[in-house]
Amino acid sequence: MTRESILKCIFIVSIFVPLAAATAFGQGTSFSFQGRLNDGANPANGSYDLQFRLFNAITGGTPIGAVASRPATVLINGVFSTTLDFGATAFNSPNNVFIEISVKPGGSPNAFTILGPRQQLTVVPFAIRATNATNADNATNAQNAVNAQNAVNATNATTAANATNATTAATATNALSLGGVAASGYAKLDVINPGQLVMDGNVRQSVNSNGLVKAMLVVTLGSPSVISRCYNSATDASTGNCGFVLTEPLGTFFGGVFRINFGFPVTSRFVSVTGQYTATGNSTNNTGANYRFFDSTSVEVFTFASGNSADTQSRSFTIIMF
């Protein structure tokens, strides 16, 4: 029989050719495919060129993956077997995968003849999908398992670290519980004078809390007057102006009105102002001072001298804010 007559017979019987999918292997994305082809009324024997395509519909539709060509496939008594691989995503929609097979005699210059109709791939080839589901779709679960194991390891590490810390705290100096800061950085009871609290360095407290000093400053009279000493608990500053701003609205040296901007809210704080005793020749030495809240961050201080008829008279003073 000539190749032309073979091709004609193939075309005639193609719509009756039953194709059977063989066992799919879960390793990788390839699977074995077996089919049976008649040449006329008899099983085909010899070499044939085969092409395989996947579609998402039994007719028309969209191709899935690339064409799988299998030239010079040997058929014995009509049976052929080959391995196909359309990629990892080819079987993502299990109910919509159809295979189309084209055939021609081996090495023939003629065009391929499509065997029809397309056959739906079910069950066995989807072992690939099952494997992919294990390796891909459940990757989140796998990652969760890794995360869970990591969480166990992290918990174990934390428990081990806590055990180490507990042992260290029990046998050393509780340094880990104090964040690694030396004991000199914390308040402690005086072992020499029981009942006394000893603190090294400045003592700080939030400006929103009560109890400790929030600000201290000494204003020394001059032209202009200056902040000669200070402490700012909000910034732990104790040099220069400590972040405070001093102005004299009525002028320097004789105005007796001083305005201090502290840079943080002061209207809810406790304020103590004391005028400094001053001996300046025959002038009155006893002095006084009072204050008012000028705005939310500023205090205005008024100093005066006893026996002086002036409402205010410039004097040095100290202001402490709690």
Image: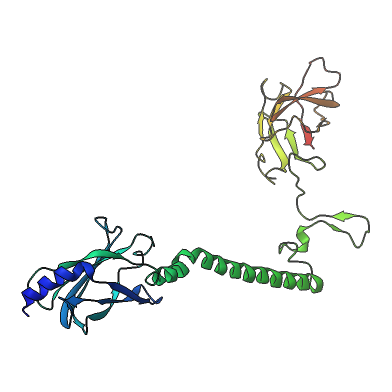
Classify 239 as above or below 54. above
**Which residue is the extreme one toward the right?**
194
x, y percent for residue 104: 13, 73
Q: Is residue 98 left or right of residue 218?
A: left
Q: Which residue is more in the foreground, 38 or 140?
A: 38
Identify the residue at image location x=81%, y=33%: 270
Please state, as top left, top right, bottom left or bottom right, where the C terminus lies in the image.
Answer: top right
Q: Which residue is more in the foreground, 120 or 262?
A: 120
x, y percent for residue 277: 84, 31
Asked whether residue 312 appears in the rendered view, the answer is yes
Identify the residue at image location x=75%, y=47%: 204
**Which residue is the extreme one toward the top?**
309
Asked whether residue 275 appears in the rendered view, the answer is no
Classify 137 as above or below 106. above
Q: Quadrant of residue 133?
A: bottom left
Identify the residue at image location x=22%, y=80%: 78
Classify 152 as above or below 282. below
Please state, as top left, top right, bottom left or bottom right, where the N terminus lies in the image.
Answer: bottom left
Q: Which residue is more in the foreground, 242 or 41?
A: 41
